[in-house]
Amino acid sequence: MDGSIFVGGGGEDYATKQGLLLKYANRHGLIAGATGTGKTVTLQILAESFAAQGVPVFLSDVKGDLSGLAKAGSAGFKLHEAFTSRAQKIGFEEYAYGAFPVTFWDLYGEQGHPIRTTVTEMGPLLLSRLLELTAAQEGVLNIAFRVSDEQGLPLLDLKDLQALLVWVGENAKELSLRYGNVSTSSVGAIQRALLVLENQGGYKLFGEPALELADIIRTDIDGRGRISILAADKLMGAPRLYATFLLWLLSELFEELPEVGDPDKPKLVFFFDEAHLLFDDAPKALVDKVEQVARLIRSKGVGVYFITQNPADVPEDILGQLGNRVQHALRAFTAKDRKELRQAAETYRDNPRFSTEDAIREVGVGEAVTSFLEAKGAPGIVERTLIRPPSSQLGPIDAGERKALIDASPIAGKYETLQDRESAYEVLTKRAADAAKEAEEAERREAEAGETLTLREFNTGRRYTGTEDDRPASRRRSRKSSDEGFGEAVLNVVVKELKGTTGKRIVRGIFGSLFKGR
Ligand SMILES: Nc1ncnc2c1ncn2[C@@H]1O[C@H](COP(=O)(O)OP(=O)(O)OP(=O)(O)O)[C@@H](O)[C@H]1O
Ligand SMILES: [Mg+2]
């Protein structure tokens, strides 16, 4: 089928070829269906076909069963007979086993190349979402980012952000005068949320070398697109991290890729598995932005395919943009199920041969109600389609095979070693030391013995615990007088620092992530 990828066979006898037009593949898509109905295999065959047509693919492997893409299926496999007879039935004459070029990625660096970004690049909006901050806390985080932007303090990893927050907490009064209310209790709450993220392994996501998009938009010398597979089984234990990371990646693609108008085929196809996690109690503002990015990323040549059990999980505005659809069976046990099923059916162009609603209820495993964009980008009439069998192995490869592929990948070694160049943590630590020295001198001038531990605490410990003064009462009493000198010194430093800002406006993108190079 020219200019399209073969998805399966439709029509009365399943022998009419159903294809997804490559030139409309950037108009996004949906793969939905109850558990065990064939979503993962559909994702697998779509990834195979895009790769074969020279389109790079990014997908997350939620259950660990998509690594099989890297290995050819075999006649010895228990479903060999089923696969070949299915291929025959749908008129898929050229069906053959084959392996595909795969790059494995893993946030935790265990099952693939580490994939990282920096805190600065992620930006305050997504980070607030990741940390589940309140509006007030988000406001404070925004101020922290402004301070970092204006003072050129790179936030590479969580350690940098923590150091900056300590600084913000200690200078809350001065910062409030300049930027608006910075409450120390908000600072403390953000710091506690950061600890939770750290405990979930979130620190692994942040640092350098950060991902270069070119490494997920690669074609091999044989012209096939590489399939990037993000190991997401462990990541699923931190669903907010999973969803925010993928959203960051989408926004990054959106910000960084050039406009291409309407390409013959997509530059990249991005599969967003367990997409409901993106929308679960997401604030309206975020959903609006996802909607906006989905609309605009098309012209960058990126097709986004949401995979979810129930299409009702996807907000309407976004669902309306998903032009290419593979709807596997939905169950209708409850009244709510039936209502959702009816609503799902209503979004299709009916086929006079059958009722869409009935078909969605009745289709068998590996069968689906499909609709792809046709001429002029109009949705096609729904079809009951038997989905083609995969060419690559169904199910995972083993750990040894995976390791061999990771070691032999074209980017082997590029991301494996974490680098820690000078950033906010180092700069602020040094500043704090200087400030402490200045403060000590001020104290000496007052010839008064006391202790000024606040900044020194910062220097030695990364944890800021809010406003509590946990020093023994005997020491607390002596604080006031010495604090005046100390506070003055700090104020001087802060004023100096604020004066030293470049005044440069940092341009942030739609999700508040950083614009580079434009
Ligand atoms: N296109 C297909 N060709 C041949 N067999 C298929 C096809 N689709 C599904 N199957 C069979 O059905 C099984 C279940 O499919 P799959 O794993 O894709 O379901 P799923 O919807 O992803 O389920 P879950 O929600 O549990 O992840 C497969 O292991 C395979 O045996
Ligand atoms: Mg699945």
Image (cartoon, rainbow, N blue to C red):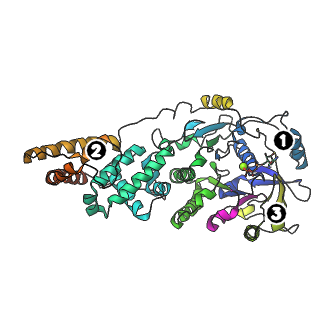
From this view, report whether residue 481 is shown above or below residue 51: below
| Mark 2 to mark 3 CA distance (whole Å) | 63 Å
In this picture, residue 319 sits left or right of residue 479? right
Q: Which residues are magenta?
A: 308-328
Q: What residue sits right under mark 3 in the picture?
A: 361
Identify which residue is drawn at 31% across, 64% down: 180
| Mark 3 to mark 1 CA distance (whole Å) | 29 Å
For this rendering, which residue is in front, 200 or 269?
200
From this view, report whether residue 208 is shown above or below residue 195: above
Q: Is residue 311 magenta?
A: yes
Q: Amino acid at mark 1?
A: Tyr
CB-based contact (under 8 Å), mark 2 and mark 1: no
Which residue in the rendered view is the most extreme toward the right? 13
Any atom of ligand 1 within 8 Å of the CB at mark 1?
A: no
Q: Toward which corner of the image does residue 52 lie, by quadrant?
A: top right
CB-based contact (under 8 Å), mark 2 and mark 3: no
x, y percent for residue 138: 42, 60
Q: Amino acid at mark 3?
A: Arg
Q: Amino acid at mark 2?
A: Glu
Q: Residues within 10 Å of mark 2 (few under 14, many from 20)?
A: some
Q: Can residue 39 be seen in this snapshot?
A: yes
x, y percent for residue 484: 15, 54
CB-based contact (under 8 Å), mark 3 and mark 1: no
Q: What residue sits right under mark 1 in the picture?
A: 95
State which mark lies toward you, 3 or 1.
3
